[in-house]
Image (tube, helix red, strand yellow):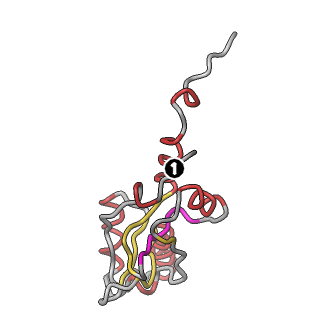
Amino acid sequence: MKNIPKIDQYMARTLYTFLPSDNIHSAVKTLLEKRISGAPVLDVSGALVGVLSKKDCLAVVYSASYHDEWGGRVEQFMTSDVHTIESGTDIIEAADLFVESPYRRFPVMQNGKLVGQISRQDILRALYDQWPDSKWSTTQTTN
């Protein structure tokens, strides 16, 4: 690949976000209704403080089934140790990060501020776009 594209060309820029103080019920409902697998959690100043994923939400429902306690705030269930990726990273470097990690998405940061989110699907699409069409043509098989 001659000119390797940057993640900025493929990342989502319009994101659903939560506050740590948001009700977990509302957050779960948003994830389900919007058909998204996770969303960044920002404090009132807009700083990234966590990510809430469907996996985190499963812990809510799972816990409720044993303890009959259903509720709380997003901050009680979100993942606080957030791994991010910098705006301007090329798609090859980003692909390597995804291959080496269990994460399905990374918040994209620029000068310490959240500017988007890049997912495995975004990177796959970016890589696919870089290959000549002949590489992706259907291979014929013989019987």
Residue lying at 48% horizontally and 41% vertically, measured from the top left = 129
Residue 142 image point, x, y percent:
68, 11
Looking at the rendered structure, the kind of residue marked 1 is Asn
Q: Residue at x 33, y 64 (%)?
A: 13
* Residue found at the very far top of the displayed protein: 143
Looking at the rendered image, the quarter that the C terminus falls into is top right
- Is residue 108 within the magenta segment? yes
Q: State which region is magenta.
A: 103-110
Q: Residue at x 53, y 33 (%)?
A: 132
Q: Quadrant of residue 99?
A: bottom right
Residue drawn at x 36%, y 79% is 24
Quadrant location of the N terminus in the rendered image:
top right
User: With respect to residue 21, does 90 lie above or below?
Assistant: above
Q: Position of residue 19 (x, y in %)?
A: 33, 83
Judging depth in this view, the residue of 53 and 83 nearest the camera is 83
Counting from the top left corner in percent of width and height, residue 121 is at 48, 51
Check the image and name the residue furthest to the front. Answer: 2
Q: Residue furthest right?
A: 143
Depicted 136 relative to depicted 74: above or below: above
Q: Position of residue 47 (x, y in %)?
A: 38, 85
Pointer 1 residue: 3
User: Does 48 sit left or right of 3 as displayed?
Assistant: left
Q: Secondary structure at mark 1?
A: loop
